[in-house]
Image: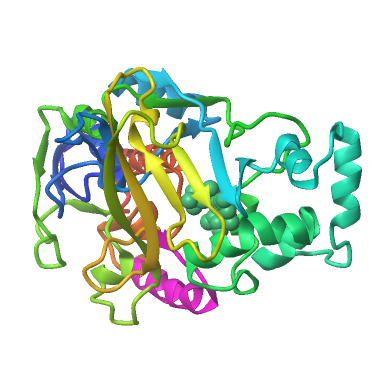
Amino acid sequence: MKHRHILLVGASFSGAVIGRELAEAGHRVTVAEARSHVAGNCHTERDPETGVMVHIYGPHIFHTDDVEVWAYVNRFAQFRPYTNRVKITARGQVFSLPVNLHTINQFFGSTMRPDAARAFIAERSDTSITDPQTFEEQALRFIGRELYETFFKGYTAKQWGRHPHDLPASILKRLPVRFSYDDNYFSHEFQGMPAHGYTALVQTMLDHPNIEVVLNTTIDQAAASGYDHVFYSGPIDAWFGHALGRLAYRTLDFHRFSCEGDYQGCAVMNYADKDIPWTRITEHKHLSPWESHEGSVLYREHPRECGPGDIPYYPIRLVTEKQMLAEYVERAQAVRGITFVGRLGTYRYLDMDVTVREALDTARHYLACLERGTAM
Ligand code: UDP
């Protein structure tokens, strides 16, 4: 098989995994990254003042049920066991998330056991909603008005800049409701944190003699010509010069502050009340509990609408965006020699494990096409 020269646009999980797979298959790979670092929004670096490992673009916890994906990321980094336990401040009290038996009993001032709590919440749920379409309907159907208005309504309005009756039910479906005291935010079998951060992990993936990484380099259609194939993990609308309009994203502003000792006693504290402008505070040293630091660095997270030049985080995917996306995807499919991958390339909110899974599948599909001599 003739070896190809392949361009990967973007050096986060999609680019690094596809690049690695193709490099190991003997192809020459160039990875071009617009920012000054690899790992995209998973980027971690040590805070110069405190020495704490900081999740620069917000907390990332790796969690998956996919045995192969878990084994794959463990090839490139030592993972430390880490369980995500999130707290939420609401109406002058601190509660446990995701909504679990402790949250329910504390909120209603009760001592219910699992079956009683299940029946109690069922009584409060709006059973007239049979097929919830919006975030609000999903909440009213499954947790009832009191819990929805306390923990979700204000937070979601801040996070998405829209009323929950205008948002899809799928956003809330990410979170479980538990009738036990299990306060693990995720329900996946494997969960952990790379001991030396995500950037070191991605750098190790990209450390291969067939891979060349170029930072601070933005690639447009002209710059991408001359390669045998391009895998593009930048925003799909940017590739087409926003010809059909801009797909909407939420972006985040982080306000850093530091202190001595322990500020909040946990990694992530959410703030439900609407009059508090931030959605959450991350105390980064609690994301690396195996390390010891005297000082502490914290980021307050302020979501807002993403404008030109801002870093896109959350694809909004309202009806208008879905239509625009369908048209961009149609254009993308008409172009030969380029594959759109990852969160920005496909305009979906992907967790890291799903990104790795899709990248592995994409690389294998490409290699299989080469073997068969069919174009992709
Ligand atoms: N959410 C909320 N209150 C919380 C946590 C989450 O209302 O304390 C809502 C919010 O709309 C969020 C969604 O539930 O986008 C999904 O939560 P998740 O933790 O998955 O959010 P993400 O990972 O997107 O920050």
| Left or right: 320, with 239 as reference point | right
For the question of whether residue 346 can be seen, the reply is yes
Q: Quadrant of residue 78?
A: top left
Which residues fall within the magenta stretch?
A: 314-332
Quadrant of image for the N terminus: top left
Q: Relative to 285, is 324 on the left or the right?
A: right
Q: Position of residue 169 (x, y in %)?
A: 65, 62
Residue 10: x and y, percent? 22, 50
**Which residue is drawn at the image coordinates 76% and 36% (left, top)?**
101
Is 110 in front, or is 211? 110
Report the number of numbered marks. Answer: 0
Name the residue located 46 percent from the left edge and 40 percent from the top edge.
268
Mainly helix, strand or loop, the magenta region?
helix
Closer-to-camera residue (95/20): 95
Residue drawn at (36%, 51%) of the image: 300
The part of the image, by quadrant, that contains residue 105 is top right
Query: Does residue 348 lie above or below 193 as drawn?
Result: below
> How far from the left and from the top, in percent, is residue 267?
43, 35
Residue 56 appears in the figure = no
Q: Is residue 315 magenta?
A: yes
Q: Is 146 contained in the magenta span? A: no
